[in-house]
Image: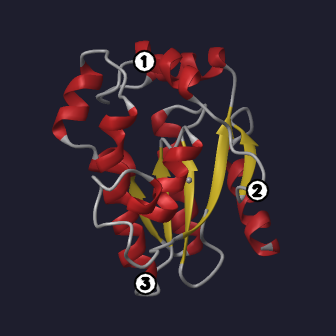
Amino acid sequence: MERFWRTSGSLVTPRSRSPVRYKSTVGAMLASELGWKFYDADDFHPEENRVKMGKGMPLTDQDRRPWLCNLHDILLRDTASGQRVVLACSALKKMYRDILIRGEDSVPPKCGESKEGKLAKVQLLVVHLSGSFKVISERLCKRQGHFMPPELLQSQFDTLEPPTAPENFIQVSVDKKLSEVITTVMETLKMK
């Protein structure tokens, strides 16, 4: 979860192929290590999205757009004030990552102001946490208290568009120890 080595930057750890709590744990640990603000995007899902996922129904692009636009606005607000941010987010598609960067400029005008306005862009570095379906499924089955049931994992894999150039990203395997994941990201940040 593409814009953050600068004073007005943020880091996104998209779920991609990692379980929800893993991405949140990585994100929280990175934020703590860096002294940055941390947000878990799942906390910002509207109730209707939570209910839909709770019933085992995958979200559509239309379901996600307002949620992603809201996250963009939060990132923009914080980075504009000089606050650096780590966002743990299910930014599964390039389009979703584009919305986090550009907000309403990435989607039809329903989301926010008209496209005629000034481009409100956030700098973003995506930390793509990747792992096999088997590993992620085993972890999800152990998770408790989350609104997304493990049965939706296949839809996440089906939706996934891993980041590619020219996106600003690094890929880290969830097979690594948590401390190794954090070290890898921290070393990458030092080089940026």
Residue 71 pos. (x, y %) = 36, 58
Which quadrant of the structure image shows residue 59? top left
Residue of label 2: 166
Q: Secondary structure at mark 2?
A: loop
Q: Where is the C terminus found, in terms of image quarters?
A: bottom right
Residue of label 3: 80
Residue of label 1: 152
Q: Residues within 10 Å of mark 1 (few under 14, many from 20)?
A: some
Q: Residue at x 78, y 64 (%)?
A: 188
Q: Residue at x 38, y 66 (%)?
A: 115
Residue 38, numbered circle: none
Q: How many marks?
A: 3
Q: Residue at x 58, y 61 (%)?
A: 30
Judge left or right: residue 93 versus residue 112. Answer: right
**What amino acid type is highlighted by mark number 2?**
Pro
Quick one: label 1 or label 2, which is nearer the N terminus? 1
Instruction: Kindly report which numbered mark, 2 or 3, lies closer to the viewer in this rendering.
Output: 2
Q: Secondary structure at mark 3?
A: helix
Q: Are marks 1 and 3 in contact (CB under 8 Å)?
A: no
Q: Judge by depth and name the residue closer to the eye, 42 or 139.
A: 42
Which quadrant of the structure image shows residue 69? bottom left
Q: Label 2 to label 3, Cα distance in Å? A: 24 Å
Q: Residues within 10 Å of mark 2 (few under 14, many from 20)?
A: few
**What amino acid type is highlighted by mark number 1?**
Leu
